[in-house]
Amino acid sequence: MGTFLGRRFETPYERVSVEPSRRYTDRAVGGPVPNQDWIYTFEEMPAGTTRLTRAVEGEPGGFFKLAEPLIERALKRQLRTDLETLKDLLEAWG
């Protein structure tokens, strides 16, 4: 379940590829933007830490194509909020 532009929605995903301990890819199979790939890559860093990189690939269609600039800004804002929440949770846990 997610929230975007003030609306809650569900997006089902399927795992389409896995490289153990390195990366995996999930593909949206429904929801507002189907056929969107979410690629998660893990990289070992100094001091035993791990860098996680998340990339999204896909082509919006219909309304989403017309509103692409607005949606891009909203997605960046949502990602920043999500990462700040994750950081707070990890710091509280650590």
Image (tube, grey):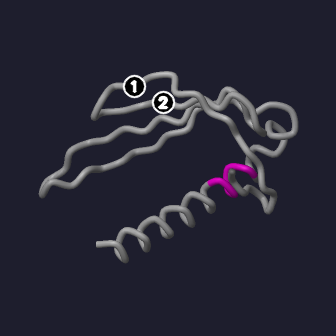
Q: Amino acid at mark 2?
A: Thr
Please provide percent x and percent y for residue 4.
74, 55
In the picture of the structure, the residue carrying the numbered disc 2 is 25
Please provide percent x and percent y for residue 22.
30, 33
Q: Label 1 near label 2: C-beta < 8 Å?
A: yes
Crowd rating for badge 1 (residues with CA inside 10 Å; few <14, some 14–19, many 20+) = few
Q: Dot 2 lies on which element?
A: strand
**Residue occupying image coordinates x 52% and y 27%:** 15
Quadrant, the C terminus: bottom left
Task: Residue at the far bottom: name it.
Answer: 92
> Along the horizontal axis of the image, is 74 left or right of 41?
right
The magenta segment is 71-75
**Most common SS among magenta residues:** helix
Q: Earlier in the sequence, mark 2 or mark 1?
A: 1
Crowd rating for badge 2 (residues with CA inside 10 Å; few <14, some 14–19, many 20+) = some
Quarter where residue 41 is shown = top left
Please provide percent x and percent y for residue 78.
62, 60
In the picture of the structure, the residue carrying the numbered disc 1 is 18
> Along the horizontal axis of the image, is 17 left or right of 59?
left
Quarter where residue 82 is shown = bottom right
Task: State the CA–CA distance, disc 2 to disc 1.
Answer: 7 Å
**Residue occupying image coordinates x 33% and y 25%:** 19
**Residue occupying image coordinates x 40% and y 45%:** 53
Residue 64, disc = none
